[in-house]
Amino acid sequence: MSPEQDVESGIRQMEGYLLWNAKVAATRAQAEDFTQRLDWLTTAQREEIERVFTEERLTFHKAALAQLTARARELREEYDQRYARLKARCLGVCAGGVGAAIGLFSYVAQR
């Protein structure tokens, strides 16, 4: 891996880390907001509900992220294949056009 690729990889990892930590913080805040509406809970009950709520939501987000990642990879492969076919077609058309131009030029030059 080149140094530039190492830097890009590191930046992507840092971005992912920061995004995930923001998701964790937001989820914890949602859990706290949820339990604050349940004013009859004891402190221990509130903490347990917040823990379970956070755990469940983060499990959901991990699963959603895994699905999105898998789909992004599928789309990338599909688009790479389409690009390769389009590139091959364009090269074929260009080669055919050049061949036709050379043939026409040869025909005209012989006359």
Image (tube, rainbow, N blue to C red):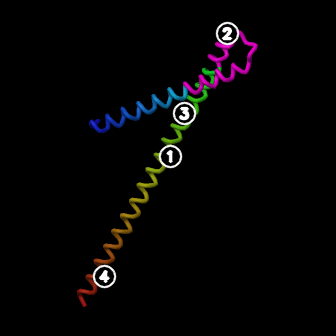
- Neighbour class for label 4 at 10 Å: few (<14), some, many (≥20)? few
Q: Are marks 4 and 2 in contact (CB under 8 Å)?
A: no
Q: Earlier in the sequence, mark 1 or mark 2?
A: 2
Residue that badge 4 annotates? 104
**Which amino acid lies under the numbered mark 4 shown in the image of this protein?**
Leu
Residue under label 3: 65
Q: CA distance from mark 4 to mark 2?
A: 89 Å
Q: Amino acid at mark 1?
A: Leu
Residue corresponding to mark 1: 75
Q: Nearer the viewer, residue 3 or 46?
A: 46
Q: Earlier in the sequence, mark 4 or mark 1?
A: 1
Looking at the rendering, which quadrant does residue 104 occupy? Answer: bottom left
Q: Residue at x 31, y 73 (%)?
A: 98
Marks 3 and 4, the one that precedes in the sequence: 3
Q: Nearer the viewer, mark 4 or mark 2?
A: 2
Alpha-carbon span between mark 3 and mark 4 = 57 Å
Magenta-span inclusion, residue 42: yes
Per the rendered image, the range of residues in magenta is: 25-52
- Residue where numbered disc 2 is placed: 43
Amino acid type of the residue that numbered disc 3 sits on in the rendered structure: Leu
Number of numbered discs on residues: 4
Task: Mark 2 or mark 3: name the one nearer the start of the chain.
Answer: 2
Identify the element where label 1 is drawn: helix
Q: Is residue 36 magenta?
A: yes
75 is higher (above) or lower (below) than 86: above
Which of discs 1 and 2 lies nearer the camera? The answer is 2
* Secondary structure mostly taken by the magenta-highlighted segment of the chain: helix
Do callouts 4 and 1 mark residues in contact (Cβ within 8 Å)?
no
